[in-house]
Amino acid sequence: MKQGEFSDMLNDIQSIINEQVIPLEPLLLSQQWKPLFKQLDQLRSAIKTKNLWAPNLPLSVGGMNLSTKQLAQIAEVAGQSPLGHYCFGCQAPDAGNAELLHMYANDFIKSNFLLPLSEGKIRSCFAMTEPHTAGSNPTLLDTTAELVGDHWVINGTKWFTTAADGAKFTIVMAVTDPEAPRHQRASMIIVPLENTGYKNLRNIPVMGHAGSGYFSHSEVKFTDCKVPSNHLIGQRGQGFKMAQQRLGPGRIQHCMRWIGIAKRCFNLMCQHVKQRQITPNSTLADQAIIQSKIAESFAAMNASRALVMETTQIIDEQGFDAAKHHISMIKFECANMLQSVIDNALQSMGALGMTDDSIVAFFYREERAARIYDGPDEVHKISLAKSLLKSSDQNH
């Protein structure tokens, strides 16, 4: 897509966010799920007619075939609202699942699962993290899938399975070859959730809010859960490799979504401090300490954005392998930037910032996990440092 056309599209997306998406946020914050999802369904249908649907997917499955840099910029705009990505059909985990199925699934899976998913007719989830094994090391997973005759039999418990509530299928990461080398033990298998061997145990409360539907994280259990052998995604034993490939693009879009969130909170902070009277003749905006928070937040946002844009350029020109260091950097750098900017906004807004009268409190509790999911900050820092030290030895 030419730059002029893309700029116009970004402006259209920003207008939809401002005029149609953000006005729906009070329903989310007051947990009025039924009217919220009704309004979202209507808006999603309208967005499809504008040809703005599923920008992350290729043309062959109804997407836009955009570059990584362009997808990142869309994520920044849509990320200004917690409803944004869902409205444009590029929300996690569906986006990553659809990309994975497009790359690796057989024709049966593509026609029965990818097609309706890419059209937004159904939702999905991704079951990898377990409550009793370290999420930072997926080679420790102990959920099993045994091939018995022509069916996989799955046993295990997963949690923080985002959007499992109301999903039609999940992609399960399970150990299929326990004696293989540790990075070749696991596979990915499609499990339709209308299955007697599957149970959604609960929507996990996150800082006091359990959520509903797409806006939830579940603990789920598989007990002798049977699916046909053709539900295997890709090659047996390649689950770890596919998980890494799935997470790469997702981290880019997460980081730009975080920048969008930070910008939203920054703007709310600026609006509030300019109108908040603290004496008859002055506002919070006149205070040097507030001005410092504004300056630091603005610099941090722009630095993070520049680093992500550099990363997308490397990916578009040289591929994901060439950007491994950058992807690790942006993961922990942007996550920490986000925490800092949200905290500055909440502190500057005082008691209002703690309430659901503002979206800031929602972002504060939901996005604290940014430093944990898709690999904890510590893991990315260690991985990056080891690579840098190794290359330093080679250079000398």
Image: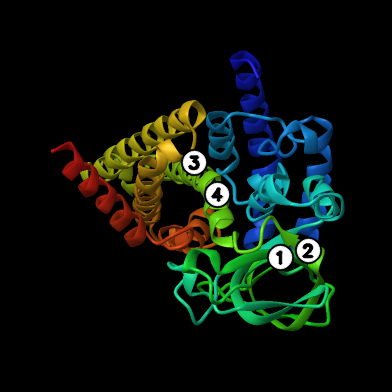
Q: Residue furthest left?
A: 396
What residue is drawn where x is 41% and y is 36%? 322
| 282 and 78: which is toward the camera | 78
Q: Earlier in the sequence, mark 1 or mark 2?
A: 1
* Disc 4 to disc 2, C-alpha distance: 19 Å
Q: Mark 1 — residue?
A: 189
The residue at which mark 3 appears reads as 256
Res 260 visible: yes
Q: Position of residue 191 (x, y in %)?
A: 76, 68
The residue tagged 2 is 231
Q: Name the element at disc 2.
A: helix
Q: Name which residue type carries label 1.
A: Ile
Give the mark nearer the N terminus: 4 vs 2: 2
Please indicate whether residue 7 sits to the left or right of residue 298 in the image: right
Provide residue 118's location: percent of width, then percent of height. 78, 46
Name which residue type carries label 2.
Answer: His
Per the image, label 4 sits on a secondary structure element best described as helix
The reply to whether residue 283 is visible in this rendering is: no
In the image, residue 121 above or below residue 174 = above
Q: Earlier in the sequence, mark 1 or mark 4?
A: 1
Q: Position of residue 116 (x, y in %)?
A: 84, 50
* Residue under the image location 50 percent in, 56 percent down: 363
Q: Quadrant of the rendered structure where residue 388 is?
A: top left
Q: Nearer the viewer, residue 260 or 187?
A: 187
Q: Quadrant of residue 293?
A: top left
> Alpha-carbon distance for marks 3 and 4?
18 Å
| Left or right: residue 38 compared with residue 141 | right
Residue 245 is tagged as 4
Residue at image x 69%, y 62%? 125
Q: Which mark is residue 1?
A: none
Q: Name the residue type under label 3.
A: Met
